[in-house]
Image: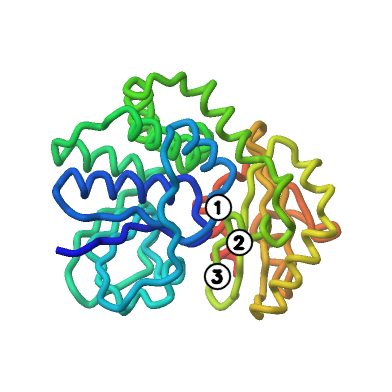
Amino acid sequence: MGEILVFGHKNPDTDSIVSSLVMANLEKKLGRNAISCRLGSINKETEYVLNYAGVEAPKLIESAEAGTEVILVDTANRKEVLDNIDELKIRKIVDHHQVAINTGYPLYYRAEPVGCTETIMYKLYKENGVEIEKTIAILMLSAIISDTLLFKSPTCTPEDEKTARELANIAGIKIEEYGMEMLKAGTDLSSFSIDEILKLDAKEINLKEVKSIIAQINTASIPDVMQKKNDLESGMQKVIDEKGLDLFVFLITDIINSNSQVIALGKNANIVEKAYGVKLVENTAMLEGVVSRKKQVVPILTENA
């Protein structure tokens, strides 16, 4: 068997990068030639995690030859991966999102309604009798902290927290202390351009017939980010025009107080008002208690589209 490329979604977050590393490690332990890959730049939070764990980032790829065997992690959406995914041979998918892919052939598929892919990966290591070494535990724990916002996100399940506590014991980490430092590291936007900020964690999503992008960043201070509001709106409008979008939603999520300021542009921006019972004033509103795009934004906007 040749090389198997393991990768997550474009605009990778910590879970996507970690899942690639952790899955490739598991495959190698089981005797398969797996290569950890990524489909985009490393963000500040993930950089903090990799530096802490002493691990190199996955290999950056932009394409793969037809027929290449691949494993998808932290995504089951063809729009989020390589453009020629239909020409590749998907061997496995491990994910915790909705299913948005079909293959026409059988494959190993593992998806569970948990807050983070690593909660599933933890089980796979146990089921295959593979020891979770300290470095792998650090990576897994970091991804769970990231995806669940230190257990504050509504996507977090008791299973996620239980798994994180067990991983923390292996990693020798105090979760709350490490987790807050890690999340804060991810809020540093000083080295990013406006275009880069808008792409850091952006997903193209069709809300019924509404062509949309929903982007999200974390911050410890919403007012600091809102100082860039005019520039952010200009960047968002540029993307709307280039991609022919009906809606661009930009979420600025406060990791301390668990709220999100939303900036919404496009001809269907009123969907945000309808969905949350708010009034957009100069294209923005506060969404109290909203932190999860997957659980508190996408389904609610879709329902009101």
Residue beneath disc 1: 293
Relative to 83, residue 198 above or below: above
Judged left or right of residue 223, residue 51 is left
Residue beneath disc 3: 207
Residue beneath disc 2: 214
C-alpha span from label 3 to label 1? 13 Å
Which residue type does callout 3 highlight?
Leu
Categorize mark 3 by other alpha carbons within 10 Å: few (<14), some (14-19), many (20+).
Answer: some
Question: Which residue is nearer to you in this view: 74 or 247?
Answer: 74
Question: Which residue is nearer to you in this view: 245 or 171?
Answer: 171
Categorize mark 1 by other alpha carbons within 10 Å: few (<14), some (14-19), many (20+).
Answer: some
Q: Between disc 3 and disc 2, whose residue precedes? A: 3
**Residue drawn at (65%, 31%) of the image:** 256
Residues at marks 3 and 2 touching, judged by CB atoms closer than 8 Å = no
Q: Position of residue 156 (x, y in %)?
A: 44, 38
Relative to 118, residue 249 above or below: below
Which residue type does callout 1 highlight?
Arg
Query: In front: mark 3 or mark 2?
Result: 2
Check disc 1 and report its element: helix, strand or loop. Answer: helix
Q: Quadrant of residue 196?
A: bottom right
Q: Is the N terminus in the top left, top right, bottom left or bottom right quadrant?
A: bottom left
C-alpha span from label 1 to label 2? 8 Å
Query: In front: mark 3 or mark 1?
Result: 1
Categorize mark 2 by other alpha carbons within 10 Å: few (<14), some (14-19), many (20+).
Answer: many
Judged left or right of residue 109, residue 234 is right
